[in-house]
Amino acid sequence: MVKGESYFQFWPARLPYSLDYPKMHLFDIVETSSKRYSCKPAVIYYGKKITYRELQNSVEALAAELKRLGIEKGDRVAVYMQNTPHFIISYYGIPRANAVIVPVNPMLLEEELKYLLKDSGAKAVITTGDLYPRIESIRGQTDIQSVIVGNYTDYLPEEMEIPFPPQLPLEDKYFPETIRWAEVMKRGPVDLPPVETTPDDFALIGYTSATTGLPKGCVHTHSTVIANVLGSVHWCTHTSKCMHLAPLPLFHVTGMQHSMNAPFFVGGTMVLFTRWDREAALQAIEKYRCTHWLNITTMVVDLLASPHLGRYDLGSLVFIGGGGAPMPAAVAEKLHSLTGLRYVEMYGLTETISQTHVNPPDRPKMQCLGIPVFDVKTRIFDFEKGREVEAGQEGELLVNGPQVFKEYWNKPKETREAFVEIDGVNYFKTGDIVKQDEEGYFFIVDRSKRMINAAGYKVWPTEIEGYLYKHEAVLEACVVSVPDPQRVENVKAFIVLKPEYAGRVSEQEIIKWCKERMAAYKYPRIVEFIPQLPKSGAGKILWRVLQEQERERIKREGYYWLKSKQN
């Protein structure tokens, strides 16, 4: 950052422009808080309280087990599960065993999962009984040597204080050729491995989809993750008295950093949810006096729509914010009327392990990325003209900071192409087109990359098209986004059928086929058969033509047309 930028006049009071970052490992977060607050609850899971001492012992037990299984420095271990205490223990136990965490979206199905496991070269997977069958079906096609399987009942109390999601299994499931989580915890930290890594060694590979359709692993060190944790701690006013409502998925960087790492860093408590439930969230805020709630916009919309909203005391909340999708002004005003708090939007990527920009908590703007946080340098660049843009003009957002990833895993070409050097500084090219207003706040305008924002999840059309081409009836396919008042954008597929399948397959059958093979946020909710796709003289599919047609149709016919087509 350059002191003198106009946004500095709105910088949070009493905060410095720069921070000093400790040289530490991820597992030091829990170890340090365990020494300070040993008997204090680190996690509350539907009423089950896990103290920092218990959490630390469990982390060390897992690290010892991974050593027993032959996991060595630099080996990758995948974590494939919903939000549970197992995830938290795995997140800190894996690096304590000198290995690298690979958080995997639990919504991914077999083919998607197989790619990530093979690409990362993971030697082990930690999962839960409800998800293990997916791993079992592809295990032989990967490098997986060991699988540890837990169950929700490992940590649920006999009498739950908050209702547990009814769709999740409550019986213990065990499978041959796997290791029982309960047995690992029972063995305890026997023969704990020595620490062999440094803070600058690889700690985590987070996968983000690529414009080519194949996900890319963003490699982070302990230091890059810690840098962003410290930024969250100060910007969002975390203290040891904080009580964090944590419904965001922990495999995703927002939940990982703001709802887990940050509160643990200061000795706070997280109220962990396996799945979002608005009534359970309202109960938890009141019962546990939650102070912080990081979320995505759709959660806020859902909570405010509860018919029981007025029954609960939400006065303990001091910070509400999130990212992934713009916050509608009307929703933000309703939230402010209810809680007295302004919603704080933030911006970040897997490549930056969460935030590079956040709104000042005392002066946020809506549908706004905010301003660059501690030690983040930014440029807004016009690559066609080869220069930085003038004030108020649009260009691609470039960022440099201590939280930027080191490389794309096993993709040197993509890594080189992701960065550009300007005036001796190496910037990451975000692919997002932004502009600054007269006060220096950043606003997103468009994307230079072809990406769909489905309720905060990134969906890359090329990846979806790759799946569609595997269907025997599909001759050609083009995927675009369509506006949606609740999900921000939805996925739509235009398909040209092979002549012999015309009249033999329906749009709904294609959607059903996709639903069985893709994560729930990815599969096309809308499919439309057309006789041919628009193409350039060189034969390139003109996806932008279809994209603009859809936007115009929504303007002309309204969302009722969209709802009538959705599945």
Image (cartoon, grey):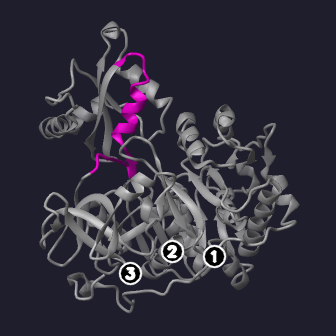
C-alpha separation, residue under disc 1 versus residue under disc 2: 10 Å
Residue 104: image x %, image y %? 56, 50
Judge left or right: residue 548 versus residue 180.
left
309 w.r.t. 168: above or below: below
Q: Residue at x 46, y 51 (%)?
A: 411
Mark 1 near mark 2, Cβ–Cβ under 8 Å?
yes
Comes first in the chain, label 1 or label 3: 1
Residue 224: image x %, image y %? 50, 71
Residue 349: image x %, image y %? 40, 61
C-alpha separation, residue under disc 1 versus residue under disc 3: 22 Å
C-alpha separation, residue under disc 3 versus residue under disc 2: 13 Å
Q: Disc 2 marks which amino acid? A: Val
Comes first in the chain, label 3 or label 2: 2
Quarter of the image with the C terminus in it: top left
Identify the mark at residue 29; answer none if there is no mark: 1
Q: Residue at x 28, y 79 (%)?
A: 363
177 w.r.t. 344: above or below: above
Residue 274 visible in the displayed image: no
Give the residue at mark 2: 229
Judge left or right: residue 323 versus residue 547.
right
Residue numbers of the magenta segment:
449-474
Dot 1: few (<14), some (14–19), or many (≥20) neighbours within 10 Å?
many
Q: Disc 3 marks which amino acid? A: Asp
Give the residue at mark 3: 375
User: Dot 1 lies on which element?
Assistant: helix
